[in-house]
Amino acid sequence: MQPSDSNPSSRVPAKRRIRDRLISREGTDNETLMSNGRLRNHVLLADDDLRETAQVLGDIESFLVKALQALEEPDLDPSKLETIAMDASVTRDTEYLEDSLSNLRRRLFSIAAGLR
């Protein structure tokens, strides 16, 4: 075990860096994939799915942080909890997450089949 592995909080920045990299990346630079004309569109769409999925994960994480902060407040405010619970954006985000992950998986299968 490496020293950074023993402290769970030390892993959080690395996970965020990965999500940030997914959001800001310009695309796949794998020559094998990009030189294959049949796969190029699938790869470009998979890149979009990766970015969109990473973005929506960040939005869901923000909701979780709000919920945690509200629950940890010494003077717990029921109306604040209700407001957070009624936030329709988290439902929209989870539905979008499901769609984007499904699209990504489908594209990965298509890319794999095209490499055979």
Image (cartoon, rainbow, N blue to C red):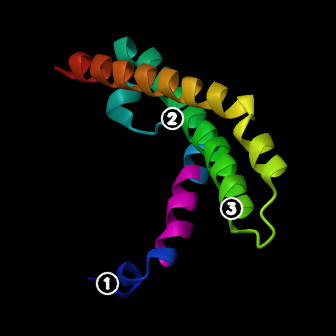
User: Which amino acid does the dot numbered 1 rest on?
Assistant: Gln
Report the Cα–Cα distance between label 3 and label 2. 31 Å
Q: Earlier in the sequence, mark 1 or mark 3?
A: 1
Residue found farthest to the top: 38
Residue 36 location, x and y as percent?
34, 20
Mark 3 lies on residue: 71
Q: Distance between the residues labelled 2 and 1?
A: 29 Å
Q: How far from the left and from the top, in percent, is residue 77?
A: 81, 57
Q: Position of residue 29 (x, y in %)?
A: 46, 39
Q: Name the residue under label 2.
A: 50
In the rendered view, tell whether residue 9 sits above or below residue 3: above
Q: Is residue 46 magenta?
A: no
Q: What residue type is labelled 2?
A: Leu
**Regarding mark 3 in the picture, which secondary structure is present there?**
helix
Which span is picked out in magenta? 10-19
Does the magenta stretch mainly form a helix, a strand or a loop?
Answer: helix
Q: What element carries label 2?
A: helix
Q: In this view, does 57 lie to the left or right of 33?
A: right
**Rendering quarter of residue 93:** top right
Contact (CB < 8 A) between labels 3 and 2?
Answer: no
Residue drawn at the location 51% of the way across and 25% of the way down: 100
CA neighbours of label 2 inside 10 A, class few (<14), some (14 to 19), many (20+): many
